[in-house]
Amino acid sequence: MQERTLFMIKPDAVRKKVVGKIITMVEHDFHIVDMKMKRFSREEAEKFYEVHREKEFFEGLVEFITSGPTVGLLLEGDNVVERVRKLVGSTDPKEAKPGTVRFLYGSSIRENAVHASDSPASAKREIAIFFGAP
Ligand code: CMP
């Protein structure tokens, strides 16, 4: 089934200057429909990560994601949500499989290089926040 998802390169990976390398990995397997560099406001970051609002790491997560620009890629394809998450790897880079983006470029559970939507419903919500409502 054709789906869309948001793949986002986080501020740590932008600072490391590995945006090009990560986009090359994504482009090899996926169709990029749209792409944008964006620095989140605090309000947008809190909305984007609202499911984590009650977690103890929420404040640190919001501070980190607003600390510099991100790069968002809108991807489309069959079963793309699940397929992209395989390329991304585990949330904690220490647990990520070799060859995944987080294994290669993540530094810690917070500074884990990239984000990808975890379901088609999250993708719809996150794409609207990142790229604006269609
Ligand atoms: P992401 O895929 O962007 O979705 C939520 C983010 O919260 C996650 O990646 C991690 O960067 C972050 N996160 C999850 N668990 C923790 C944790 N225990 N400590 C700090 N950050 C976390």
Image (cartoon, rainbow, N blue to C red):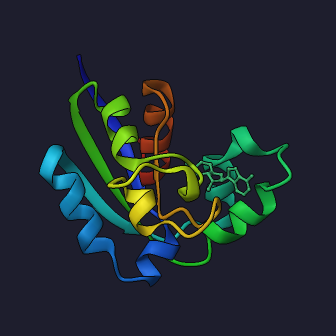
Q: Determine whether, in the image, residue 3 is placed left or right of residue 86.
A: left
> Which of the 4 image quarters holds residue 8?
bottom left
Residue appearing at x 64%, y 59% in the figure: 109
In the displayed image of the protein, which residue is found farthest to the top? 1
Residue appearing at x 22%, y 36% in the figure: 76
The vertical placement of 37 against 95, above or below, is below
The vertical placement of 93 against 55, above or below, is below
Q: Quadrant of the N terminus?
A: top left
Residue 19 picture location, percent across and down: 32, 72
Residue 60 picture location, percent across and down: 76, 65
Residue placed most toward the observer, 22 or 62: 22
Residue 48 picture location, percent across and down: 60, 48
| Residue 55 seen | yes
The vertical placement of 95 against 39, above or below, is above
Q: Determine whether, in the image, residue 92 is placed left or right of residue 13.
A: right
Residue appearing at x 38%, y 45% in the figure: 6
